């Protein structure tokens, strides 16, 4: 699928053009002269077709024994592994991150295929003793039906896998609307699943834009579960629309992630962590380090070293193995980041490095911006509170651990947070008190592994977690089963009371 330049919707095991015949182009954000592909600009008619296919495939798929469903995922893991290099290049070309990072995206999907595949042989329920004699009781997980998935562009393979693979092993069928800027990786993932033996209609892909292709999926009455990752603004709308039909909705949304540096921290380690956390994926990670909250005794030394390293980052096309930081994903994102840089200046923060668009040499044909560091940022400034989603770091100076924790928690979001310190008491306090779904000690705010729950608190999420042992919860319904083999009517809470 990935070698074709025209990507049709994948519905019921067939590639089909959008009903309206409308398409859109995606170009490489590092070099807009390069066409990545032509995609279907789908609407509600296409979504209806895809949901109908997923609904028709559900009764048979739910009856496939879970270990057999898992085996398909395990075979898909092997195919992903064999194609890692090609898929990494596709991913870099469609959304811009350097090749070594794109490889990480594929490895995450491989890990998730192995982890979810193994779940086919676990999928534990509980049994408990009954309070009545000759009675047995247990609980089992059951699939729910058609799951609607809406994903962003920043981890196009990993996020699709985090949603799709647990949903499939549970026995659900899927309609996915990938991020419009990076849909190729979803096709690549599904290509492996299909070759591994996934029956037609079990996974369907409908490409297109949020309001025209995503919203009809959210509102479709035959889609009881919605799994969404994206901005808090869109997530809130998705939640409201789905609530009208009492749907189960899992939301993974924005972040404004703090990295705290105490005065006893190993600054060499901090430097590496900050550069990776703030400028990796061009700052376009939901877990990106966007606030550096530093003890005043080490601020000057640390900032000087960060600025020196940031200005030396090699920026360019991610397909060049020398590139350390790629472009922003599109023109809107470029405009948004430049706007926030202007806001930071207007708010009175000090621009210590970066701040400008790059449009020469390796950056001549893409959406590039310099790694940017602001100092003198106060917690009330917009650049300290709002998600920028670009390579912009806001440095906030503090006097103590108490102040650092208060500043860290004083934002709407709560995805990831980190602290660098050699004081074990400070580390444990931070671990308990940081309002975040993920906390790192002596590591940057990015780097989650698939075996632990992933998600955030406050405006970042609505209480669900992807990955880890929690990953099945959104995609399965508990059923409690009581088996009375006494041959008599036994009334719980009545017949066994003395
Ligand atoms: P976005 O909210 O603009 O889009 C996300 C998805 O929603 C896209 O597929 C889009 O087409 C779709 N969409 C847009 N409008 C819609 C509508 N009205 N109805 C239904 N669907 C609609 O986000 P983005 O720019 O693709 O991604 C960046 C955002 O995602 C950031 O806020 C980032 O923090 C967040 N994110 C969060 C996580 C997490 O796990 N918490 C992970 C990655 C990205």
Image (spheres, grey):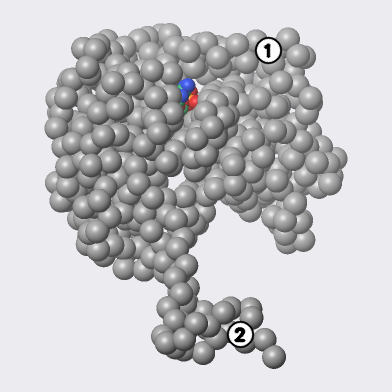
Q: Between marks 1 and 2, how big is the CA–CA gap?
A: 71 Å
Name which residue lies at 76% across and 36% down: 410
Q: Is residue 116 left or right of residue 405?
A: left
Q: Categorize mark 2 by other alpha carbons within 10 Å: few (<14), some (14-19), many (20+).
A: few
Secondary structure category for the residue under label 1: helix
Q: Does the residue labelled 1 lie within 8 Å of ligand 1?
A: no
Name which residue lies at 26% across and 34% down: 52
**Foreground tag (1 vs 2):** 2
Q: Nearer the viewer, residue 180 or 80?
A: 180
Q: Nearer the viewer, residue 245 or 279?
A: 245
Q: Which of 24 and 168 is in front in this view?
A: 168
Please say whether residue 425 is visible from this viewpoint: yes
Residue 317 picture quarter: top left
Instruction: Please give the residue where the numbered disc 1 appears in the rendered image.
Output: 343
Name which residue lies at 42% across and 21% down: 210
Q: Where is residue 104 in the image (x, y as percent from the top left)?
A: 37, 43
The first of marks 1 and 2 along the sequence is: 1
Q: Position of residue 114 (x, y in %)?
A: 31, 58
Instruction: Please give the residue where the numbered disc 2 appears in the rendered image.
Output: 495
Q: Position of residue 231 (x, y in %)?
A: 53, 28
Q: Position of residue 315 (x, y in %)?
A: 43, 23
């Amino acid at each position: 699928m990935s070698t074709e330049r025209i990507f049709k919707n994948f519905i019921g095991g067939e590639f089909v053009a959008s009903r309206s015949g409308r398409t859109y182009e995606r170009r490489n954000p590092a070099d807009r002269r390069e066409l990545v592909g032509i995609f279907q600009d789908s609407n509600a008619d296409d979504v209806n077709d895809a949901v109908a296919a997923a609904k028709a495939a559900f009764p048979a798929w739910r009856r496939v024994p879970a270990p057999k469903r898992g085996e398909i995922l395990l075979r898909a893991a092997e195919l992903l592994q064999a194609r890692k290099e090609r898929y990494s290049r596709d991913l870099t070309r469609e959304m811009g991150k350097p090749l070594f990072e794109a490889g990480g995206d594929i490895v995450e999907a491989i890990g998730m295929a192995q982890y979810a595949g193994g779940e086919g042989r676990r999928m534990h329920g509980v049994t408990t003793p009954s309070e009545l004699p000759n009675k047995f009781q247990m609980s089992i997980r059951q699939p729910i039906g058609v799951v609607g998935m809406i994903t962003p562009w920043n981890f196009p393979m990993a996020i699709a896998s985090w949603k799709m693979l647990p949903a499939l092993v549970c026995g659900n069928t899927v309609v996915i609307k990938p991020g419009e800027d990076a849909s190729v990786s979803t096709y690549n993932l599904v290509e492996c699943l299909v070759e591994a033996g996934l029956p037609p209609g079990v996974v369907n892909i409908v490409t297109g834009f949020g309001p025209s292709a995503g919203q009809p999926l959210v509102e479709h009455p035959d889609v009881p579960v919605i799994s969404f990752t994206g901005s808090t603004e869109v997530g809130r709308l998705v939640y409201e629309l789905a609530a009208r039909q009492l749907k189960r909705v899992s939301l993974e949304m924005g972040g404004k992630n703090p990295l705290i540096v105490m005065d006893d921290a190993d600054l060499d380690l901090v430097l590496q962590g900050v550069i990776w956390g703030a400028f990796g994926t061009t700052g376009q990670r939901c877990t990106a380090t966007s606030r550096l909250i530093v003890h005043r005794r080490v601020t000057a030394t640390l900032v000087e070293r960060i600025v020196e390293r940031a200005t030396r980052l090699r920026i360019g096309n991610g397909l060049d193995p020398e590139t350390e930081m790629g472009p922003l994903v599109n023109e809107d994102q470029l405009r948004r980041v430049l706007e926030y840089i202007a806001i930071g200046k207007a708010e009175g923060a000090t621009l210590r490095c970066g701040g400008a668009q790059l449009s020469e040499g390796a950056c001549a044909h893409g959406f590039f911006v310099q790694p940017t560091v602001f100092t003198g940022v106060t917690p009330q400034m917009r650049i300290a509170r709002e998600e920028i989603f670009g390579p912009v770091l806001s440095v906030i100076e503090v006097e103590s651990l108490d102040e650092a924790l208060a500043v860290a928690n004083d934002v709407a979001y709560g995805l990831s947070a980190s602290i660098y310190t050699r004081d074990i008491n400070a580390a444990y306090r931070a671990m308990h008190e940081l309002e975040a779904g993920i906390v790192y000690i002596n590591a940057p705010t990015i780097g989650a592994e698939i075996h632990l729950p992933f998600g955030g608190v406050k405006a970042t999420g609505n209480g669900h977690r992807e990955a880890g042992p929690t990953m099945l919860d959104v995609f399965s319904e508990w059923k409690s089963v009581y088996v009375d083999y006494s041959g008599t009517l036994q009334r719980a809470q009545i017949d066994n009371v003395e």
